[in-house]
Amino acid sequence: MTFNLNLNTIVSPINENGTTTLTGLITDLDIIGGEVTLDIDWGVLDINGNPITSDDQTITIRDGGPNDADGLANGRISFSLTHQYLDDNPTATPSDTYTIQVDAKEEFLIGTDAVYVIDISGSTSSLVQGLTTPVGDQNGDGSSNTILDVEIASFKALNQELRNRGLGNVAEVSIVAFSSSASRLDMEPGTTGFQSFTTPDKDSDNNGIKDVDQVLMSLDDGGSTNYEAALQQAIAAVTTAGTVPNGGNVIFLSDGLPNTGGSFTDEANVIRNTKGQNLRAFGVGTGAQLSPLQQIDPNAQVFTNPQDLLNVFGGAGAGTNQDFDSIQITVNNVAPTVNIALSSITINENSSVTVTGSFTDPGTFDTHSATINWGNGTGNQALTLNQNKTFSATYQYLDDGSFGGTPQNGTPFDIYTITVSITDDDTGVGTASANITVNDVAPVLGTLNDNLPGLGIIVEGDTLQLSANYTDVGTKDFHTVKFNWGDGSPINSSVKNPLNGGIGTASDSHVYTTAGSYTATLMVTDDDTLSDSDSVDVIVAKKVVLDWKPGSNPSSMNFTGGGTIPVAILGASNFDVRDINVASIKFDDQKDVLLNGGGVGVNVRNNGTYQVSYEDTNSDGYVDLVAHVNKVSLRSVVNPNQEPFRSDQQIYAFGAFDNSYFFGIQQAGDPIRITG
């Protein structure tokens, strides 16, 4: 069969600036897994009708490689290429026709380097069966047309082909000769030391014979046949030469009669897969056994003269297989194509959007004008185009209202269609549109400030103060400010004027009269019903009565020395002291210290229990909790000569009871007196 290129029918016509896909099939490659070079002339012309060679392409496709559609090394390559036609030059007609021409060439060898693996076992002294072209006595051993003679002549022909390809001073050639064992040969007889490879043109001893040919002609037959050793040395030759994957060839010639050594398929896999070399095996003469060679190369073939080997590699002495094909495509003129993008498809009122975009036009010398319509009733506006066919424009949507920017139209958002129109000098018009949503924006409430102590607890009768700043990008919005104290008291509500870009302030206070847990909330709502809010949790501690030094009035306490001082936390109808968590009780002369987690606790006995008792100290029928406080601890937090005790004459108690809190104050009419 003959190497053949066929281009498939393509889609035609296409629009200028459009892309065509060119597909084709190359069949009957001589090298299974070989490479084909495609030179593609896309037929592109400039405005004057001259070819534009910069669009031409040269690519290399491997049979079974990533660009082969079927992915199989089977002597067939299916390819697919694309090309973009930017214009319908050269004429001013609505369309023009181009001729696409493709030149396909199959190279007979892969890459630049070669390792020649040659069988010199005793069986190669036999005459070649089926020899069609005599080769004579190649090694001067007195015998002509032996298997070894044909091997030598074939490798000499391949070496000449490397020179024909212009690789005489580039390719690195190694020779592995094998029989019972194998060895790499010294490739430069005229160079001191062992040279594992040389170039095809090298003549190191200047005797007029290329070194590769001279080394080949020095071979003699003898010994058994060891394929494993031969391939191991071939691996070493590739490694020594530093040949990169897909950069070289390992060509194995034998009569196919291995009779010593071990399995050699693993070495073949290393050469082909790990080293990435083009591994080919050939049997010499019709008497060669192919089955062992096919373990090296599944596509192993028999040849009967050197020219057959060259033909297998696709050269036939010329170095390539070649075929041509062409096809025509029509390109139509079209109007400009416009593409736009928005910096955001959703913005808030009073914000801006930027429209960026580009356009293409097959008329590369056309001039263009453009307009933009923002979709809000302001009409078409001139749009400046850049030389690189791009543009950009920014617009501020002041409100989410109706045309004209009227605020407070009762909708949480409005949608506008932005349209860019570009007209070429042939009246062709291209447009592109995009929708933008302009949202009403809720007011933003700043940090909610409060006067709560660290524990978030206040006492019955205390005042909670809340305040916060707020902003709104809707500069024309009115705002309703509401304080909900969470205790069932009336909601405080007031209407605020528009901020006009400024900052609003909301503040209020409330007295909590009943112990409990509450949530106080501040909400700011604009006139389009959007709002922002924040809240704070408030715990109101129950106010209870203390009696320091129960049974005495005034309550005189001697702070000197050791010991403890008793204090009664008086029970009541709505306060059962037995629900108090004794471990939580703290004492201090400063209210804020206790509400921020400070103070000293109840004295602990030596046995680890709290020193407390339950009794009715004031004979009112309710149980009181009598707690003892260590004097030393109490002196650490109460100084009778300093504020606040000097003014308040109070030592407070604070603690937890029944999932709530209490705050104790010395009973009226029984002042605390500290002596010592």
Image (cartoon, rainbow, N blue to C red):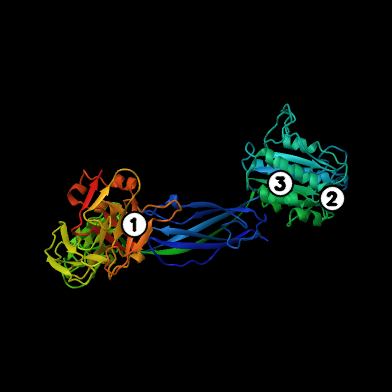
Q: Quadrant of the N terminus?
A: bottom right
Q: Which mark is residue 566?
A: none
Give the residue type that dot 3 points to. Answer: Val
Give the residue type that dot 2 points to. Answer: Pro
Distance between the alpha carbons at the discs numbered 3 and 2: 18 Å
Distance between the alpha carbons at the discs numbered 2 and 1: 107 Å
Please state which of residues 493 and 530 is positioned toward the viewer in this rendering: 493
Please state which of residues 387 and 239 is positioned toward the viewer in this rendering: 239
Q: Earlier in the sequence, mark 3 or mark 2?
A: 3
Count neighbours of disc 3 (C-alpha within 10 A) and say few if under 14, some if 14 to 19, many if 20 or more: many
Give the residue type that dot 1 points to. Answer: Ala
Q: Which residue lies under the disc numbered 3?
A: 250
Q: Which residue lies under the disc numbered 2?
A: 258
Q: Position of residue 102 (x, y in %)?
A: 53, 57
Mark whose residue sits in front, 3 or 1: 1
Q: Which residue lies under the disc numbered 1?
A: 627
Distance between the alpha carbons at the discs numbered 3 and 1: 101 Å
Q: Position of residue 39 (x, y in %)?
A: 53, 53
| Quarter where residue 189 is shown | top right
Q: Quadrant of the C terminus?
A: top left
Q: Position of residue 669 (x, y in %)?
A: 18, 58
